[in-house]
Amino acid sequence: MRLEKIIARSRIIDLHSVTLRGALEELLSVCAEKFDDLKPESLLRGLLARESTMTTYLGHGVSLPHVRVKMKRRYILAIGRSRTGIRHEGVKDEERVNLIFMLLAGDRAPNYLQVLASIARQVREPELVQNLTTAPDLDTLYERLVGGFDGIRPVQAQQNRTNRLLFREAQRVASGAACSAIMVFGDTFIGGIPAGILRSKIKTILVSRNSVEQPASEDKEDFNITLQVRAFSNQRMSQLRSAILMALTHGALNFTDRICCIGGVAGSNQFDTLTVVEIEREFQTLLTGRNDLLPLDVKPEVLERVIAVATELAIEGREGKPVGSLFVVGDIHKVEKLSKPLVLNPFYGYKEEDRNILNPFMDETVKEFSSIDGAFLIGGDGVLESAGSLIQAVDTDHSLPGGLGSRHAAAAAISLKAQCIAIVVSSSGQVTLFRRGVMLPLMDRRAQ
């Protein structure tokens, strides 16, 4: 989502309170001045009740309290900054909250969890949070939110000329090689790709680790679709395979497509690499003559989120130690018949919204429960049904490469017996996807 669509300068304030309750009262007061149908007292109770159920602290001094309410508008976002810091129950004693993003969502607002996750992603980078916290005034803070952050280097005129030249060459290559799309790796640029560089009649897909907005264009949008794919390696175009997988699940690409990819060193502001990829060859082990990689009941954004959590877990582990995990997504009723609980279900009794993998506050919960033996069972809509489940499906038709253990065998078997996708995080840091018993490595820790 575009953050500037729900942010207003009038709802950005400097906070005077030193407690979370007082800060929320200040933010609700600002909202009530503009929208007289809001009831601050009721909203405050709802915000604090959610806080008592699950902390809304994101880390790095940022909190994202939120609540759904019956109102005409879809979303209202109010932002408070505290230079001295606010006490928060979800924070360590020595830490303080410096930024509060309070989101009020209408009870019929669509894509509520996606909007919440989008905001969370944009304020999770420590450097960006620091730039907001240290803004000299609120006008500057607003400008940094909607127009980029202070300290971003301008792209030089020579770089712009070179980038335009390389993109024109990418169009020629794409046309000559009968490519169906051009994939652009946006992390090459700091602060987004400048307007006017990308003008193409060929479908253009933007890939970036952050939620990147469309650059301004007088004639048309420069990108047909944007994909948020995190790279965990400094290798050139390390996002390539995951990006293609996401494009396939979104229906932006087909297995028979050929694409031209253009990118460069992350943060260099300079394109320097062109490559042509045949998707069918890249994913030949996974195709097996089928074109429906994504099960019918699995939403693309759910698979994206599970892969993101799995890759983060592969890199970070828990408390510095590698942790192996198994995620099974989709066809939940059949998967439950082919599994049994090893422990009491930690997700039992919670509302579906609170235990949805798309909820950004579930990340740490999932990572913490990853140390439990067994699999996470996740519905196609993202709802976490259980953790610590033993997969009892049997597969005698496929043999796995040497070195892979029971977790991979269980993933292969369940993906064959049910219309689901299984994702394995090995203790060595490798992330592997299974569909119909066939494996696709997504990330290898040794490549980092």
Image: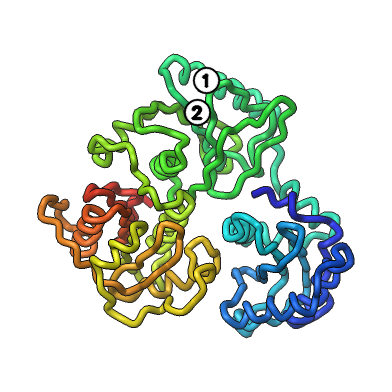
Q: Mark 2: which secondary structure?
A: strand
Other-residue count near label 1 (Cα within 10 Å), few / some / many at <14 / 14–19 / ≥20? many
The image quarter in which residue 430 lies: bottom left
Quick check: marks 1 and 2 in contact, CB under 8 Å?
A: yes
Of 19 and 247, nearer the camera is: 247
Position in image of residue 296 (x %, y %): 38, 48
- Coordinates of residue 436 in the picture (x, y in percent): 24, 49
Q: Which residue is mark 2?
A: 182
> Does the rendering let one see residue 223?
yes
Residue 27 lies, in percent from the top left, at: 80, 71
Which dot marks residue 171? 1
Up the image or down, 146 lies above or below 68; here it is above
Residue at image coords 31%, 54%: 420
**Image quarter for residue 376?**
bottom left
Q: What residue type is disc 2 on?
A: Ile
Name the residue type under label 1. Answer: Gln
In front here: 391 or 404?
A: 391
Q: Is residue 229 left or right of residue 15?
A: left
